[in-house]
Image (cartoon, rainbow, N blue to C red):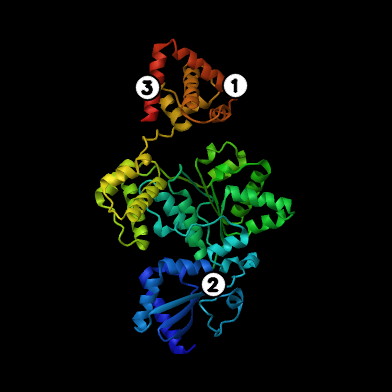
């Protein structure tokens, strides 16, 4: 390849970088090489089939336009996949491959742990058995609002860290209900972290972690499994509430301690805070709570509207004529309040109806197509800490009084009321409620619940007090 072609290729890459931005360029184009230029055709190569398919699907026109700015005669970009041998060999001119020939395997199954740092995110996961990643779940596609700003900022901080940097908060623990963006943030951290060559970032669901550990035990490779995990720079664990089994939890605890003590980053997501993960060992809960714990709240109307607009724009990449009028977006943002997945599902339905029936999207159509997604407002999730705070304020005692061993009448009755409300307004078990009330036995909680149940049926004053407390907690 001539010096002139390399200089031209450098200018094309510069145009591409300024067009798509540094983040996208480093994620998708940093490992793209120029193979040859012949007449109207330019042949480029990338190291994996995944990169090839993603660039072809999303950036083919931009790559072509950047080349045409340098060479107006170019009308075709051929994108091929380099073989593993081609990637490993010293840089030298390689014969152009036939674009019609079936692509050769990249040989990713044989990648050793020590080489994972230079592989893209998909290869990392093939090499270490990571959970699948969705290429749509990146920081670029994440819509921020008041309820998720802190979680997003913390995740970006983690993703932009470099090997050897001091870890600001460890672990980063994100919790939220279903469909509020936990998995999106965790996968965005993984994509961004693996876009460079410095760090090894591994994304695992709790189920995949359990499966990997059990499989390693069966094949007598548990030591290698442990060493591989502890060699990761950033370990990302999703849906921690599903982690089960005493031996698996013990191994997770050891891995967590080893990574944190070594200054490696751990990022975790679950559907509840660490203190509410009843199935986990106290030591694990304590370690999780020792980092930065961030809750992602429910989606406000403005954020829901932003998500809808983002999904419409994403759909228009492949369906340029697809359009959703502003009144329809406003209606969807007000009517669909449950979670982000319902919002995405609504846009998919409108897209399918519009394309299959060749009809424009109208408000009447939207109301008809998404009626089953319009759910009644979900009641506020009540926490035991909220109950203790409201009850203590109502009865003019302190929260520490409720948790103490004091047996005076002015403390016993409020404590029993708080336990009763914890049992009736939350999904927490009797042992968990007892633990949250100063480490009491579950039989004490059961006695309190039965006592208050009996009293409210015949004491009108107490019944009114309990109903008042319930309304305060549910507002």
Q: Which residue is mark 1?
A: 443
Q: Secondary structure at mark 2?
A: loop
Q: Residue at x 73, y 54 (%)?
A: 219
N-terminal-most mark, 3 or 2: 2
Residue closest to the far top: 458
Q: Is residue 297 left or right of residue 279?
A: left
Q: Label 2: how many residues lie within 10 Å, few (<14), some (14-19) or many (20+)?
A: many
The answer to which of marks 3 and 1 sits earlier in the sequence is: 1
Is residue 341 left or right of 108 when viewed as pictured? left
Q: CA distance from mark 3 to mark 2?
A: 64 Å
Sequence-wise, the earlier of marks 1 and 2 is 2
Nearest to the observer: residue 263 or residue 181: 181
Q: Is residue 67 above or below residue 132?
A: below
* Quadrant housing residue 378: top left
Q: Nearer the viewer, residue 363 or 157?
A: 363
Element class at badge 3: helix
- The crowding category of the residue bearing disc 3, from other C-alpha atoms within 10 Å (few below 14, some 14 to 19, many at least 20), is few
Please tell me which residue lies in front, 360 or 261. Answer: 360
Which residue is the site of mark 2?
47
The answer for how far apart the CA atoms under marks 1 and 2 are is 62 Å
What residue lies at 64% left-to-right and 49% top-to-bottom? 211
Element at badge 1? Answer: helix
Label 3–label 2 contact, CB within 8 A: no
Q: Percent x, y for residue 60?
A: 41, 71
The residue drawn where x is 29% and y is 56% is 323
Give the residue drawn at x 40%, y 45%.
342
The image position of residue 83, as x and y in percent, is 58, 75
**Residue hosting label 3:** 468
Which image quadrant: the C terminus? top left
């Amino acid at each position: 390849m001539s010096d002139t072609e390399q200089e031209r290729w450098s200018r094309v890459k510069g145009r591409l970088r300024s067009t798509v931005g540094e983040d996208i360029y480093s994620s998708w184009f940093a490992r793209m090489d120029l193979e040859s230029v012949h007449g109207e055709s330019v042949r480029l190569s990338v190291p994996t089939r995944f990169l090839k398919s993603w660039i072809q699907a999303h950036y083919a026109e931009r790559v072509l336009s950047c080349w045409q700015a340098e060479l107006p005669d170019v009308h075709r970009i051929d994108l091929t996949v380099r073989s593993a041998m081609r990637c490993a060999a010293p840089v030298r001119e390689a014969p152009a491959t036939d674009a019609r020939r079936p692509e050769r395997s990249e040989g990713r199954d044989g990648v050793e742990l020590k080489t994972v740092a230079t592989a893209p995110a998909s290869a990392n996961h093939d090499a270490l058995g990571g959970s699948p990643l969705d290429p749509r779940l990146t920081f670029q596609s994440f819509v921020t609002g008041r309820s998720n700003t802190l979680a997003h900022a913390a995740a970006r901080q983690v993703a932009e860290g470099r090997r050897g940097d001091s870890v600001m908060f460890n672990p980063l623990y994100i919790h939220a209900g279903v469909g509020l963006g936990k998995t999106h943030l965790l996968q965005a951290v993984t994509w961004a972290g693996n876009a460079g060559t410095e760090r090894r970032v591994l994304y695992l669901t709790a189920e995949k972690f359990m499966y990997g550990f059990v499989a390693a035990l069966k094949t007598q490779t548990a030591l290698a499994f442990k060493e591989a995990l502890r060699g990761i720079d950033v370990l990302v664990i999703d849906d921690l509430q599903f982690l089960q089994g005493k031996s698996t939890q013990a191994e997770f605890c050891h891995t967590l301690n080893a990574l944190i003590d070594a200054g490696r980053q751990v990022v975790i997501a679950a559907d509840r805070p660490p203190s509410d993960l009843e199935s986990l060992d106290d030591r694990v809960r304590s370690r999780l709570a020792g980092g930065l714990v961030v809750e992602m709240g429910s989606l406000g109307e403005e954020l829901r509207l932003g998500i809808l607009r983002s999904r419409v724009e994403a759909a228009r990449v492949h369906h340029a004529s697809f359009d959703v009028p502003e009144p329809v977006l406003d209606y969807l943002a007000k009517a669909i309040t449950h979670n982000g997945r319902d919002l995405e599902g609504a846009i998919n339905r409108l897209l399918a109806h519009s394309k299959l029936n060749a009809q424009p999207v109208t408000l009447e159509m939207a109301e008809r197509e998404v009626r089953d997604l319009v759910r009644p407002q979900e009641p506020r999730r009540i926490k035991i800490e909220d109950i203790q705070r409201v009850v203590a304020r109502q009865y003019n005692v302190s929260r520490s009084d409720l948790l103490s061993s004091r047996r005076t009448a002015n403390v016993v009755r409020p404590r029993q009321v708080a336990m009763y409300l914890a049992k009736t307004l939350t999904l927490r078990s009797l042992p968990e409620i007892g633990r949250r009330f100063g480490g009491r036995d579950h039989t004490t909680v059961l006695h309190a619940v039965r006592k208050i149940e009996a009293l409210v049926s015949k004491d009108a004053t107490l019944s009114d007090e309990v109903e008042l407390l319930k309304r305060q907690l549910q507002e």
